[in-house]
Image: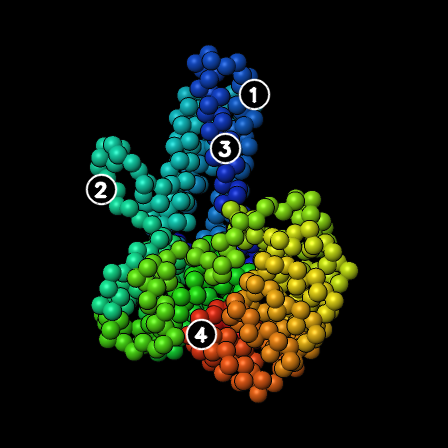
Amino acid sequence: MLYPLLQASSWALFIGRFHPALVHFPIGFLLIAALLEIGRRSGKINVNETTVVFILFWSAISATFACIAGYLLSLGGGYDEELLGDHMWKGIGVAAFAWVAWLVKSDRVGKLIPFGKVAYLPAFGIAVLLTMSAGHDGGSLTHGAGYLTQYTPEPFRSLAGMSPLEEKTTEIKPIANVEQALVYKDVVQPILEARCVQCHNASKKKGDLRMDELALLVKGGEGGPAFVSGKSAESDMIKRCLLEERDDDHMPPKGKPQLTTDQITLLAWWIDQGAPSDKKVADLKVSEEVKPALASLGKGGASGSSKKPESAVFSLKVPPADEKNIQALRKAGLIVNALSQDQNLLEVSAVNAPAFGDKEMALLAPVSEQITWLKLGGTKVTDAALKDIAKFKNLNKLHLEHTIVTDKGIAELKNLPYLGYLNVVDTKVGDAGLKSIAGMKELRSVYVWESAVTDTAVSQVTKQYPGLLVVNGFSEAEVAQFLKAGDTTATAANVPVKKP
């Protein structure tokens, strides 16, 4: 067992997270030195020995720093201790033998070491071999055991005595008979394997949590139980999915494939039903809200790829935005990200540009066709800006929270064909504004918390348009209700969802 000599402080983890970057330097230096040495000794290239000595020196230096960062990273826990120990000692071995190879090869030091020339090649060779072996262990620690060799093709598998290749994929296969499907085995477990197990398995237990077995999922991790049976709204594994993607506590982490709305709905339903291990779908109570998610399992929709488009706008093909126009937005402090590389759709956010106002709207005009998600919350925009936004024909999500927009401006949006999400939290938008857009065909959710919209108007609109979710106040206890309504965008609504 490894006993850390330091505490996992924020500084230690900050430095430790540079390990994946630092570790590439000794790998590169040692392999270059090995190739130069082979070329020099075989007469293929003419290279001075001092060049090899110089590269060996930096391989030893970088390997040492990589070891230090690796140790600091390990203090965060969540790794298989045996595999971590092997990886650590191999890494230390790389640094140690790299130093030995440099010392005996160096003109100044090598002459002082008896039998130095004899020790050079063995030390150098061991350092190179340990580099490759440590790299294999590092891949297993990060991605799970056998990650580097998982897809070894034939005939190499047979020659190495490996079992036949079993095709693994993050795509979840459709269920032939959903009613007779086992809820955990056929519905829940495939979702967890596709989205969660990569970071929560036997070799990588992030947060000391394993999700590859039900018993271990029930046990939970360092933060306590992963879920509270019968209470999805109080369960960490649901609440973390509902946080903003940029939040450090959001799961899966930003950049990883995210759970779909249907997937979160099904996980929450399973928890609310007591998280059974052996019951079939037909044995549990299925509400009208959950039925569409279950029905889509037969088509691979609910638990399939997270790339399933939520709106028809994602089926459109638009030309790429001019790079000069994108750079102009970034120069103004806006964040511009690609939503979909193949469709050239963009997300533009003014989260770092609170001074953005009506005058700056002209910067968005050249990319109006590409903008699909627009975040102007907390900026200086007024109703005048909404006249320009009304021309963004492919807009799907619009954030206007904490601005001074009113009913007059909101009414300008009613002809947007793909608008599905609108956030007017803490604005001057009232009942008239809500009613003016409530009938929009694609509109799914409107967040009106702390605006001028009244409860009476919310009640009237939701009765008239039952497919529209209007959030007028939000609490943790209501999470399950909104999940069943089929919308997880509350996490981006700037409403008070408590972190786990």
Q: In this rendering, which labeled residue sits more in front, label 1 or label 4? A: 4
Q: CA distance from mark 1 to mark 3?
A: 18 Å
140 left or right of 19? left
Quadrant assignment for the N terminus: bottom left
Q: CA distance from mark 4 to mark 3?
A: 52 Å
Where residue 28 is drawn, which disc sits there? 3
Q: Residues within 10 Å of mark 2 (few under 14, many from 20)?
A: few
Would residue 200 be seen by someone viewing this image from the given angle?
no
Q: CA distance from mark 3 to mark 2?
A: 32 Å
Q: In this rendering, which labeled residue sits more in front, label 4 or label 3? A: 4
Residue underneath mark 1 = 50
Q: Which amino acid is tagged 2?
A: Ser
Q: In this rendering, which labeled residue sits more in front, label 2 or label 1? A: 2
- CB within 8 Å, label 2 to label 1: no
Q: Which amino acid is tagged 1?
A: Thr
Residue underneath mark 2 = 163
Q: Position of residue 383 (x, y in %)?
A: 72, 70
